[in-house]
Image: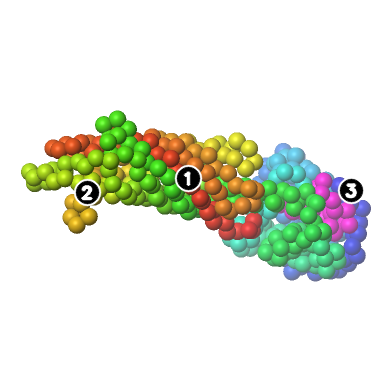
Amino acid sequence: MAMGGNGIGISGAGLALLLMLSGPAAAGELFTQPEAGVGCRTLAQHAFDEIPALFVAADPDSLLLLLDRWEMTCGPHEVITRARILGAIWDGAFDESLYGQNIMADLLQRADEMEAGAAPDSARARYDEFTINLANQLLPHQPTDSLEAFFCLYYAGRVEEARALLDADELADTSLAYRFELAREEMSWRHQWTMAAAFGSWSPQGDLSWVGDQALIGLQLGRRDGDWLLRLVGEWRPGRTDQPYWVSRDGVDYLSDRWGAWLLGGEAGYRLNLTEAWEAQFFGGVGADLLRPFKSDNLVMGAFHTSAGLGLRSRATTADTWIWGFDLRHEWIDDRNEDAVNLGGTAWSVRLVMEKVFPRGGVLR
């Protein structure tokens, strides 16, 4: 970036007024470079005072030198990116080469900081106040639907207005709009609360095969957090057994063919992206398997339940909040009703899942 003067016609007096409102020392006292070898904290304190003064003095070359030295000494930082962008807008030299792939992290960090606020009466607080005032003064000089207007709105603290502006057709082909959309989709896909309905079939195996296949209806409440997932699972398996079975209670055996079983538990797992729209899930679960053999009786026979499974999830586009998929799961149910017919064993289940992802709050929405 090369800045050669005040390209948009804001007067030095106007910037000086901003400087006085923001509170740093007078410009003439600040045109000194810190000594070589100073630490990042000292350099930052110097820069927080020096940068506003360089704007007032209309000295873009010194501003660039200071920002370059700051970044070379301490590494990239949001406050440096902010000064570069506002400086380029002030000089009429803005373009998208000013920022790279970290711009989204910088913008989100700035939004969080504006919400939290800096320590009062600090050099950083005065610097932040100066950039807010500067962005407000630059804004009327920018084309309405432009990236320059976006950054002025954003750095002035009008984040929601800036976010709405980025959806304008005029900005659709910009690198920033593309990065923003990718970040929003990633947040929607990876860090969300979810609710899902499940339908399928439960097929007991081995010593439980006499029960026969049962329908499965379920509800899941979960959260995606990065590549990890966690969900609460409730399932009901209504139906009748293929063969009646004996139930022992208080030393008396009763005959039943009812299989009104409930599963209440949780599942945790890991998700792996296969393509842009498909992901695989690997999960395990624990819970309680509850069987009520008689409709007119309060008898409930419980057993510890564990499971392991894999699933696939897909959606039509990465912006969709509706996801569909299926799970294949192997289950182990501890022994119960041992005095009559053991109702523990293993089973396979298949679930068709329709899942709703709830948008996360914040600037990306």
Q: Judging from the image, what secondary structure is the residue with disc 3 in?
A: loop
- Residue 279 is tagged as none
| Type of amino acid under label 3 | Ala
| Type of amino acid under label 2 | Pro
Question: Could you say where residue 276 lies in the image, as x and y percent from the top left?
Answer: 64, 41
Q: Residue 342, located in which quarter of the rendered image?
A: top left
Q: Judging from the image, what secondary structure is the residue with disc 2 in?
A: loop
Asked whether, in this view, residue 155 is left or right of residue 338, the answer is right
Span colored in magenta: 79-98
For mark 3, does the 10 Å Cα neighbourhood hold few (<14), some (14 to 19), or many (20 or more) residues? few
For mark 1, does the 10 Å Cα neighbourhood hold few (<14), some (14 to 19), or many (20 or more) residues? many
Asked whether, in this view, residue 222 is left or right of residue 184, the answer is left
Which residue position is annotated with label 1? 352
**Residue at point 45%, 37% (across, down):** 328
In the image, 295 versus 329, the foreground residue is: 295
Q: Name the mark nearer the viewer: 2 or 3.
A: 2
- Residue 2 is tagged as 3
| Type of amino acid under label 1 | Leu
The CA span between labels 2 and 1 is 27 Å
Q: Judging from the image, what secondary structure is the residue with disc 1 in?
A: strand
